[in-house]
Amino acid sequence: MRLHNHCLHILLLLPFTILCAIPAIAQDAALLKQLEQSSYLRTVMKADSANGGIERWLKKKVELSRNLPLADDFNTLVHKGPGNITIDHSNTVSGKGSILLETPTSLPVKNPTNRSYAFAEVIRPLKGENLEAYNRFSVWVYADAPGFYSFFVGCTLYNEGRHVTPTPGRFEGQHFVTVYPHQWQHIIWEIPDLYRDSVTGFSVNIMLTGSPKGAADTMKLYMDDMRIEKVEAENSRGFNLRKDAIAYSNSGYKTGAVKQALVQNVQDVKFRLMDATNKVVFTGNGKRLDSGFVQLDFSNFNTPGYYTLKIDNRVTKPFPIGSDAYLATAWRTLNYFFTERCGYDQPGIHQPCHTDVTVVHPDGRRINVSGGWHDAADLTQGIGNTARGGIAMLELARAIKNKNTALYKRLLEEARWGLNWSLQTRFGDGYRDGGMIIGIWSDNITGTKDDMQGKATNNPADNFIAASYCAIAAPFYKDDDPVFSGLCRKAAIEDFGFANERLVTAITDKNETELYAQAVVSAMNLYRLTKEQHYLDSAIQYARVVMNCQQKERRTDWTIPLHGFFYESKEKKRILAYFHRSNEQFMIEGLSMLLTDAPANADAPLWKASCQAYADYLHDISNTVQPYGILPAAIYELNNADFAGIYHEGAPVGLPSMEEYNAQVKNGIHLGGGFYLRRFPVAYQFRGFHAVLMGKAKAAFILADLLKDKSLKDIATRQLEYIVGYNPFAMSTIYGDGYDYPPLYGAYAGDVVGAVPVGIETFENDDEPYMPMQVNATYKEIWTHTTGSVMWLLAMLFKDE
């Protein structure tokens, strides 16, 4: 029996016993199983590990192997940090004994940065050996930590040759893996891109993260059977497609959408689309492109169902066409937020946490900040990411309200969790918890060493986004809970006022465009909530500043005569670019809201011209990164960078320089003079670019609606497809969603279904994709902002069904 897409929406409302009795296929079956097992996200979803990339990697043929003895070479091992090491013969996989590292979970004094207390490390030394013949590190570990559901173990490659590894000030050369207690776990780490011409050692380490309340204050880690190996390495750099793979949207394709897949180096371009019974329902001839690529296009096929693509001897896993497309992704990204609840008893993840963390007002008042969502692989909180995630949930809820009642209700429930935290952590006078680093577990007892205290701030950007969150939310809860709705409305009005008061004094030549654009969006959300004219008037006033920061005329002196992009300020000293988080949609979002709500205003032609210019910009750059169709990051100018705002954690070594900036810029597409169009952002310590991609995708979706331009919708959709499989690595980058997804840097939360990483990065100064097997910050780090952005894009896809 084939389960059609429209049936799923009905089934999602049925009792779990009925769901179990109905057969299903592919992702649909996995989704139904996850929904049943989690009681519709009343407990966290479990991943189907068979679909992960790690399962394929573990099965690779080992062509060359060399043992790095541990117990036999015990006297040569180097132990650094707290704790002690011994040989243990009772718990071993090699039969030769394992190395037992015992360490406390914390130190007597908390790290003032609120990060981990220390690392406990065991180094297996080598004598400056050239290990370029090997490309994989392997070790087995076994964790014992009562009261911990999981913790993460790090591996390090030490090289002292032409390049030092770990890279000083950066995150290269270290690999972190989530481990679960009371089971031997095989860690593998392919290292084809790491420098290893003079290797002085490999290590295994534990980060001292403190203990959740009630957990043990010591940790044990057994390590055994350490090896270096040679395997057929994954492609980790460049645009060439993974060997024998098909790149496609693992989440499926909506009816009426462009439906394409990509292969490389095939003999025959004929492809087939097959249904769940393996019946061929569509055939076509792929289009040959440069570098041996072939594009498969089945856009004209729109019959709902589950399908596979086959070309030569290659075949995809099943994917949906129709309204089921991206439905599993929607549920799973929502699961990520549920998993990341702070202060919540989350079985399998953590006990109630951080009830002893506070934020302090300048006048001495303090608020407990437990609650909301941990916003990344660490335990940090902040209103910016909280509000963005909550807004994405509400937008998705709006899009599916009449299509999927179960998902709608669960979205509102989770959005309320974030709203409660946003309301709880404001002092009511403009000051609030803007965000603070929380990088350890605490004991939930005030007055002990692990207490963490942040300073409340009165920041217009924080209050604008909080005002938007509450303004959008208020109507959703008005019928069922008018009191809560009223609290959201009141907070929205007040927070907008606080932001407005400080707007002018907060403006710099770096944030003028973005902050005024955010002000337009916030003002329009308040106007839609209250219908009060002064909010519309404010938005109109702010929009004039935003438009003055735009490049209106085409740069005819460039090889691509671009226009429509924005500068950082109206002084136009530097073109606006993002490398980590991105708010590139704000400028277009606000102008689009104005055009929708006040089309007869005298400034409307200017708003329309500004939107059209940015639409031109997106169209003009949409074909520059082929064959994947992703939008390049930004335009950069040589010798024109300001590093003052670059956040860098740790020692000063590795800080960005103009020399490094220029080297990256020059690897972009030369436009003329000192200007280059980079496919990927210029970046330093913080790398991974899903957010940058999605900022532009959001703007493209908004303009597609505004200008009735389907091609912009197709462009926007392609950016999301890149994240879920249409990329050189032929992997969904969302953990537990789709196929061949990689392990991610989940840290304290472990392996989280629906987590979206910071994203595919670049290698050093290159301008091409890089996605190593290595798991580390920031590119593999799970993150609220990126997961929320995916959810926002999903809202746009479901909106027009």
Image (cartoon, rainbow, N blue to C red):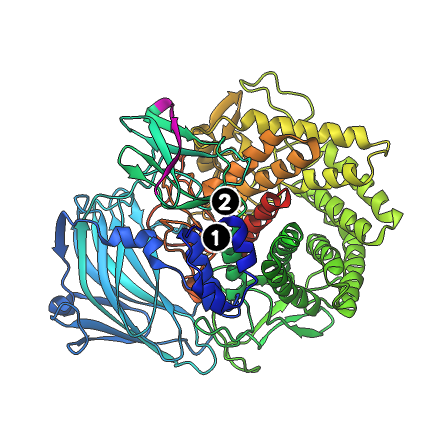
Choose between 674 and 748: the one closer to the eye. 748
> Three-letter amino acid code at disc 1?
Val
Q: Which residue is drawn at 73% across and 41% down?
A: 590
Residue 651 picture location, percent across and down: 44, 55
Judge whether 376 appears above or below 731 on screen: below
Please state the extent of the stretch shown in magenta in the rendering: 278-290
Q: Residue at x 65, y 37 (%)?
A: 568
Q: Looking at the image, tell me whether mark 2 or mark 1 is earlier in sequence order.
A: 2
Q: Is mark 1 on a helix, strand or loop?
A: loop
> Three-letter amino acid code at disc 2?
His
List the residue tagged with mark 1.
756
List the residue tagged with mark 2.
690
Which residue ends up furthest to the right in the rendered image?
Answer: 533
Residue 599 picture location, percent across and down: 82, 35
Q: Is mark 2 on a helix, strand or loop?
A: helix
Q: Is the magenta stretch mostly helix, strand or loop?
A: strand
Horizontal side, residue 77 vs residue 265: left or right:
left
Label 2, label 1: how far apart the Cα atoms are:
9 Å
Choose between 458 and 272: the one closer to the eye. 272
**Within 10 angstroms of label 2, few (less than 14), some, or many (20 or more) residues?**
many
Pointers 2 and 1 in contact (C-beta within 8 Å):
yes
